Amino acid sequence: MATQREGRNRRALTRLVVASVALAALLTGAVGTAAAADSSTTTHATSGTSSTAGEGHAVLHLIHGRLPGRGADPHAAGVANNYAISSNWSGQIATGGTYDSVGGSWNVPAVSAESSSSSASATWIGIDGTSSQTLIQTGTAQQSSGVDQAWWETLPNAETPINKYVAPGDAITASIIAQASSNLWTITISDTTQNWTFVHTLSYVTPKASAEWIEEAPTIGVQTSINDYGSVTFTGMTVTGPGTASSAYTPVYLGGSDPNTGAFNGITSWPDTYTGNGSSTVQYGSPTPVVTSVTPATGTTSGGSVVTISGQYIFAAAYVYFGVKLADAFYLNANGSLTVSSPSGTGVVDILLTSVDTRSSAVPADRFTYSSSAPRSTHGYWLVGSDGGIFSFGSAGFYGSTGNLVLQRPVVGITPTADRKGYWLVATDGGVFAFGDAGFYGSIPGLGIAPAGSGAAKELNAPIVGMVPSTDDRGYFMVAADGGVFAFGDAAFEGSCPGIGGCAGSAVSVMPDATGHGYWLVTDTGYVYTFGDAPDDGAPVDDNGGQALPSGAVTSAVRTPDGLGYWVLIVDGFVLPFGDANIYGATNGDALGSVTQQNPATAIFATGDKLGYWIASANGSVYDYGDAPADGSMAGVQLNGPIVAATGW
């Protein structure tokens, strides 16, 4: 796993949220059903006395965000445990009904004087922001500088500060209520300590799919950490509307990732379990993991044993130790357990999980025994050059190559059989070469189709860029640069880019999903297209082109072994994870610095346990991350052609 009041100026606060698998059914698509239309129909009414910002109490300008569709957070949790992990939300989310109103009360938290000047927090109630791009909310904000304020907002519009005095400890009561048979909403927030009430009625369109009670880490220029707010207890938690009486309540834990490596940094704010009594506490810090079992409890002294850890608050782990040795890689499973690759060691050790500020206690159930007689996992990989030369490493066998043949067109891909006792090579003209136990099921030249650009009457529109096998190895399909897909044997054709009017950019990779009845097609511009039943797990570039690639073009992609996610590789070695893919490192941050324009990153390929991956570059260098072993490379060897593809386990 990669390692790691007065007189104040007005500051801008924004929200950036990563969704969790726990809300996958709710969050699918994450596209608003209606655009926000916020037009005030009445002015606010106030009562009581208050101080205003003009009296020396600075106003924070907040821009709140929603909880969008499935994101890249590798520590997103599963539905079985009914919890979610977000990059900046913590609290409770109610779903399962149509939410006409939400209400709640809280005391404004007092921020610790030791909190960083760049940290902040916001306490609020709201409706939507999970399955839509709309969100109506009101609450209070607290910054370490001592600025406290009340506010309301409707996305995508900017936040509106409420010009009333707010202090730590003040008793706040708020509600958001939809008026019957219209798009009118009434926002009410009261500070009973300061004796003021704010009421605002507006027109707003939103699907009413969820209600929230949230303590949030905002953004001040850049993403901040949440400040030490102690704890906040929401009381009088109410919702109304059809089906809301049987709402499901999902606790949301705030967990951050390193902005450079994507490595999980742990939980920093967490809620209790809602029991239906109208009260829920959110507190700063992290719950303590409790280990109840490890399976298997024995592994090889050389390390690399795949171990599953179960218990309570397992998802809070930022680091996993086998005794005093830190494990390189781990990931969370949908059922809440954790899978880790053991480091090397001897004797009997306790597996200890460390969160941000706590560590699991050593108990008999967490003990792991190193044994020299324990079975060792096998691993290996193949590199392939443009001339079809095959270079095998580790346990990967050599079954033949085209290095001694004169090819019509260069080789662009390699795909192993399921038992790893053979492989296929594919060339840009769609020629297929089967080696070992790989079966031959046809090729593009065999159909009488000439290479792209040949000038023949019947030719490919674009060169072939890759291939993948069917689930039973009795077929395969190829993808061309224009996104055209060609199926052979029992491979199921599920669609192509030309069939949907074209794709943005040139295709560089195709990956089958978990079922074998769908696939993802990735383009060099960072778009990911889904066909068949392949889920939309995200892409480097969103559907509107609003998110740019971090650096350069996409050169490769590989799915996770379970087919529930994928990694996307950028030409400079940057790695982006999607679905259940974790991030273990990237060559763009490698101290060797040997991935350059002259030696681009050309392939990413995964270990069989989902706990690591390799990156290969054109000159045959291989970089290993997570538990991927360094089995060798072709760096420093004169090659007949650059390394264009690789695969392994």
Image (tube, helix red, strand yellow):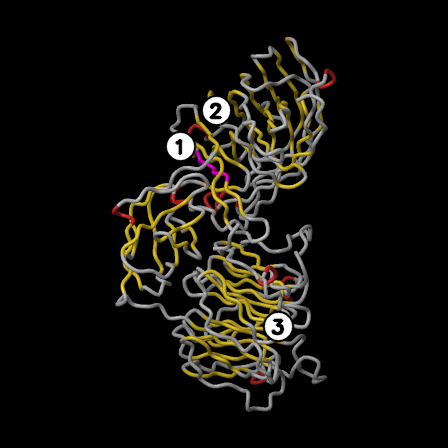
Residue range highlighted in magenta: 249-254
| Residue for badge 2 | 234
- Nearer the N terminus, badge 2 or badge 1? 2
Judged from this view, the residue extending furthest toward the right is: 54
Spatial CA distance of label 2 from label 1 is 12 Å
396, 448: nearer the viewer? 396
- Which kind of residue does numbered mark 2 sit on? Phe
Q: Which mark is residue 480?
A: 3
Is 137 located above or below residue 321 in the figure? above
42, 265: nearer the viewer? 265
The prevailing secondary structure element of the residues shown in magenta is strand
In the rendering, at what x and y percent does residue 491 appear?
48, 71
- Report whether 41 appears left or right of 537: right
Circles 1 and 3, Cβ within 8 Å, touching? The answer is no
Q: Is residue 253 magenta?
A: yes
- Nearer the N terminus, badge 1 or badge 3? 1
